[in-house]
Image: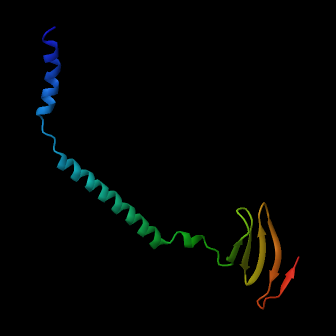
Amino acid sequence: MRFLPVLLLIPAECYASEKIDYVSYTLKAFGSLLVVLALMFLAVYLLKRINIAGRFKSRDMQIVDKLYIDNKHYIVMVKVRGRLFLLGVGEGIRKIAELTVDGDEKSD
């Protein structure tokens, strides 16, 4: 029983004698970080270059302006094939008026 503490220290002594190279671990981690960041920037650049979002834009319909009333309700001006519509958006969508170019409006 007297040798039990000495036997328990032998594995600890073996591990303590090995020299750990922290510099190489740090360089590997830094290199991996650089590779991941470079891949992320490359992906963002390619997505902007390809312009995926531009393919989903409509040529016939666009939102001209939006005015928020509160968190759930807003008024939006939409241009559809040269015609302007004023819409109220909340629980549903309601046409408020059809606007003409000179500012007159046709209410519904």
The image quarter containing residue 30 is bottom left
Relative horizontal placement of residue 27, taking residue 66 as reference (left or right)? left
Q: Which residue in the rendered view is the most extreme toward the right?
A: 108
20 versus 80 height, above or below: above
Q: Residue at x 29, y 54 (%)?
A: 32
Q: Position of residue 15 (x, y in %)?
A: 15, 31
Q: Looking at the picture, does residue 13 appear above or below residue 67?
A: above
> What percent of the width, then of the height, locates residue 5?
16, 16
For the point 71% across and 73% down, the residue is 67
Toward which corner of the image does residue 2 lie, by quadrant? top left
Left or right for 25, reference 68: left
Q: Residue furthest bottom?
A: 102
Q: Residue at x 45, y 73 (%)?
A: 49
Q: Is residue 53 left or right of residue 39?
A: right
Residue furthest toward the left? 17
Say which of 5 and 53 sits in front.
5
Total numbered labels: 0
The quadrant where residue 88 appears: bottom right
Position of residue 40 in the picture relative to residue 51 (left or right): left
The image shows residue 90, relative to residue 80, as above or below, that is: above
User: What quarter of the picture does the C terminus occupy?
Assistant: bottom right
In this picture the colour scheme is: rainbow
Q: Position of residue 1 (x, y in %)?
A: 16, 8
